[in-house]
Amino acid sequence: MLQELDVENYAVAEKPRIRFHAGLNLLTGETGSGKSIVVDALSLLLGARASAEVIRAGNPRARVAGIFEVTMTPALAELLDSSGLQAEQGELIVEREVLDSGKSRAYVNGRAVTLGFLRDLAPALGDIHGQHEQQDLFLNSTQLAMLDAFAGAGSAVEAIGEVYRRWRLAEKRLAELRGNEQERLRLLDLYRFQAREIEEAKLDAGEEQQLEQQRRILNNLSRVQQAAATAYDALYDSSVSAAAQVKNARRALEELERVDASVQPLLESLQTARAQIEDASLTMRAYLDRLEPDPERLEHIEDRLALIEKLKRKYGVTLEAVLAHGREAAQKADDLESSDRTIAQLEKEQQAAVEEYAALAAKLSRQRQTAAKKLETQVQKELASLAMPEASFEIAFQPVEAGTAGWTASGADRVAFLISANPGQPPRPLAQVASGGELSRITLALKSCLLTPPAKGRHTPSPRTLVFDEIDTGVGGRVAEALGQRLKALAESHQVLCVTHLPQVAGFADAHYFVEKREGGQQTFAEITELTPAQRVDELARMISGAKVTDAAVEHARQMLKTNRRKAG
């Protein structure tokens, strides 16, 4: 549930902060007053794309923040854990900043998150329905998704999608292996040559660095010999070497020890130092003995490094990349050589996937058809309560191509929602039949069936924030009242936010907000105010009578609120 929405420099809204309530929250105001700002700002928190155009003129950024009370589910807990987040006392603070560069930043509980994370989080927070979503309802894919949601078939669709991907992968690999034989042989020769060339080079990881070091020594042999000889002399071979100095110091300390025994530890330290110097001297002597001119070795190193450089130009920027390419080429050659065996194995995998898919698709289709009958009945009941008692709603399962040609990641079914708004008219697809007002009611009926607490034995959806942006477009009078009653009923199990122009709908609000534009200092500001009971009467009267509020309109508004409270009680 959305507890609070904080908007800063968004469109004409400067700094409104709105506290929402459980139940039905209605927003009203004159046309163009900025009622949809709340819906648009909330959509940013649910992962909608951002544009710098929403930033209030003269400001570097816009900011939207919402405090949501959430119901912890295993899926939500897993999603939050994946980003190191948790709902503190059952609350999430979601923020979105839009910069004048067009870029945006998102945060959950103060931690930066990606836009994709917000979109994954959105189903646990809320659902926004507007004119765009009504157009989506015409799509068969949307209709199938709604049927699956009603049927609780999410896990079945996920399982069949995984099998579908395995089947298509096997099919793709088979097509590659069964391709042009001449091309297969050409590739086989190429991979064999590459693998053999790299194998015959007998490369070792780290070899290049060792060769580079040896080349540097041989190319600078005189300097190396001089430096090594100097070091050897300083350690051991000269009269003032470290070994000689330590020896002289030891003699002096031995003489001193006869008088003062406390210097014994120093004698032991010098003995250790002498042993270390002698070891270093022997190592340096051996190093000097190895420093001999070796033109043949230098030539071999140059040839070896030239070979490595050549292979690196052909197969990778590093020696490790060359070795990896050699292994890959050898594997590809083996795959091509054993293509017959590979094809046979892939054919088995493909056939197994086909059989598994067919079984899952048949089971899923039965689940969908059973759910479709129930959904038809429930939608018709909902439509009757929305002043469409004669409407007929059907879910048609359309034929698909035989065999695997008609398969998709969602199964082997195609469905179409059909509606007949008037008696004697055959049901037809929504896009062909439904007017704007009828489509609003059909949408609300479907949403109600998917979101209200279901019958025993079915999964109960977690309470969320449902946002309806002018869902009452094209309706009025008795139909508007029925629509308001349905929104009120839906608000018993979910928080509902609704932008409306109709007093018949606004009269059912649990919390009523008025949106208006004010001008000051050559600027325009949108203000959002939660109305008191007395202010509600005035606003409903304005909505009933227009610019000039009459006493009759005020009395009508009072009676409307009184009647609605009695119905709710």
Image (cartoon, helix red, strand yellow):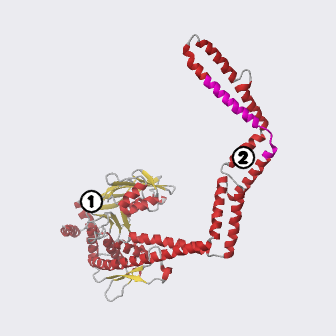
- The one nearer the camera, 334 or 321, is 334
Relative vertical location of residue 389 with respect to residue 226 in this rendering, above or below: below
Give residue 389's position: percent from left, percent from top. Answer: 27, 81
Relative vertical location of residue 531 with respect to residue 425 in this rendering, above or below: above
Q: Residue at x 61, y 15 (%)?
A: 253
Give residue 467's position: percent from left, percent from top. Answer: 35, 65
Task: State the residue position of label 2.
Answer: 211
Residues tagged 2 and 1 counted as in contact (Cβ below 8 A): no
Does residue 381 appear to the left or right of 190 in the view shown?
left
- The one nearer the camera, 549 or 512, is 512
In the rendered image, the residue lying farthest to the top is: 259
Give residue 39's position: percent from left, percent from top. Answer: 38, 63
Say whether residue 544 is visible: no
Say whether residue 154 is visible: yes
* Residue 431 falls within the magenta-colored stretch: no
- The one nearer the camera, 510 or 124, is 124
Secondary element at tag 2:
helix
Relative vertical location of residue 131 with respect to residue 245 in this rendering, above or below: below
Secondary element at tag 1:
loop
Q: Quadrant of residue 392?
A: bottom left
- Which of the two discs, 2 and 1, labels the residue nearer the N terminus? 2
The tag on residue 531 is 1
- Say which of marks 2 and 1 sits in front: 2
Look at label 1 and name its amino acid: Leu
- The one nearer the camera, 295 or 445, is 295
Q: Residue at x 72, y 60 (%)?
A: 197
- How far apart marks 2 and 1 lie (CA) works out to 83 Å
Q: Residue at x 64, y 14 (%)?
A: 252
Look at label 2 and name its amino acid: Leu
Relative vertical location of residue 462 with respect to residue 94 in this rendering, above or below: below
Residue stretch in magenta: 271-298
